[in-house]
Structures are given as C-alpha cells and as structure tokens.
Amino acid sequence: MRHTISVLVENKFGVLARVAGLFSARGYNIASLSVSETLDPSISYMTIVVEVKDEKILEQIKKQLNKLIDVVTVTDFTKKEHVDRELILVKVGCAAKEKAKLEGLLHKYVAKLIQHKTNTAIIEAVGDQEQVKQLLEGLKEFEIKELVRSGRMAITQ
C-alpha cells in the first residue's frame, strides 16, 4: 500500500540526503518526493510517498524519521482526512487541425494548454492521482512525447 508522509525539516544542507538515506538503507523506494520551503524559509516541507506492505515497518520508518536531528514533525496522511495533488507537464503531438479536439479533452480535467506550436502542444494539469491517470489515458491518442511530474503534495483538511 502506498503511504503519504509529510516531514517538516530544518532547511539545511544535507537534510534531504539523510531523509532519503533512511529509506534506502531499509530497502524502500520513494515513489514520490516533493520538497519546498514553507512560509518560514528556515523550514522545509517534504511530502514523501512510499510503498510499504506492513504497518509495523511504516511505524518504524516514522520513528526513525523523528530521531533525525533536523526533523521537526512527521505526519502520516494514511488515516487522516487530507487533500493531495500532483502537477504534470505533458508534451503531446498535436497538429493545428487537432487543437480543438485536444482543448475539448482538457476541458474535462483541471488542465490547460500552455503552448501550441506547429505539431506539438504542452499541457499543464493539477489533480489527484486518479484525475492525472485519466487525463494521461485520454492524451494517449495524441502521442505523449514527454511527461514531467512534480510528485504528490498533501495537506490535512
């Protein structure tokens, strides 16, 4: 099961490496990682998505994170009401005659056409995991040439 964890950390050199190292040392792959400063520039907010099958292991990871000197708080969103979103940028093949069809598809989602040139279009979309998945499925008919994802971000309600 995928778990979303937020970690507030001191914004210092090497903190990200120590947090990531904690996961890799235990053999767990980070599926998604998003990091940025908070309103307080001395604190950063990490959203980490990790695949863990056993709840005991997840508890151990959270305890280990809390032991790191630069960690302020650890929050597991698994059992909390929260909102999560991901940003994607997608480059697709799109001739001028297909532009209206593409815009019609984008209208169904929280997506917009950022740029359209001769035979390519760049799309920006923000949504939860299912919305992003559905949009990407719909975009397959336009030949996806490139995809960039931000990683999941989450906040409690």
Image (cartoon, helix red, strand yellow):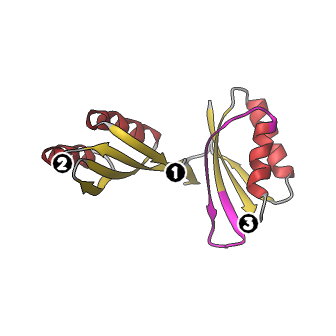
State the image coordinates of residue 38 (x, y, percent, origin top left): 63, 67
Asked whether the viewer can see residue 132, the reply is yes
Q: Residue at x 28, y 50 (%)?
A: 121
Instruction: Using the numbered discs, state the Cα–Cα distance from disc 2 to disc 3 in whole angstroms.
Output: 43 Å
**What element does badge 1 sit on?**
loop
Q: Residue furthest left?
A: 97
First reached walking from the N terminus: tag 2 or tag 3? 3
Circles 2 and 1, Cβ within 8 Å, touching? The answer is: no
Q: Quadrant of the N terminus?
A: top right
Tag in front: 2 or 3: 2
In this view of the protein, which residue sits in the foreground, 131 or 12? Answer: 12
Above or below 39: residue 46: above
Q: Which residue is mark 3?
A: 11
Q: Residue at x 67, y 73 (%)?
A: 40
In this view of the protein, which residue sits in the foreground, 153 or 74? Answer: 153
Instruction: Using the numbered discs, state the Cα–Cα distance from disc 3 to disc 1 in whole angstroms.
Output: 20 Å
Q: Is residue 60 left or right of residue 87?
A: right
Crowding around mark 3 (Cα neighbors within 10 Å: few <14, some 14 to 19, many 20+) is some
**What element does badge 2 sit on?**
helix
Q: Quadrant of the C terminus?
A: bottom right
Q: Given the image, on which type of amino acid does mark 1 rest?
A: Ser
Magenta stretch contains residue 101 = no
Q: Residue at x 37, y 41 (%)?
A: 145
Q: Which residue is mark 2?
A: 99
Q: Is residue 53 left or right of residue 124?
A: right
Q: Given the image, on which type of amino acid does mark 3 rest?
A: Asn
Q: Which residue is mark 1?
A: 150
Q: Which residues are magenta?
A: 25-45
Please give the count of numbered marks on the rendered protein.
Answer: 3
Magenta stretch contains residue 43 = yes
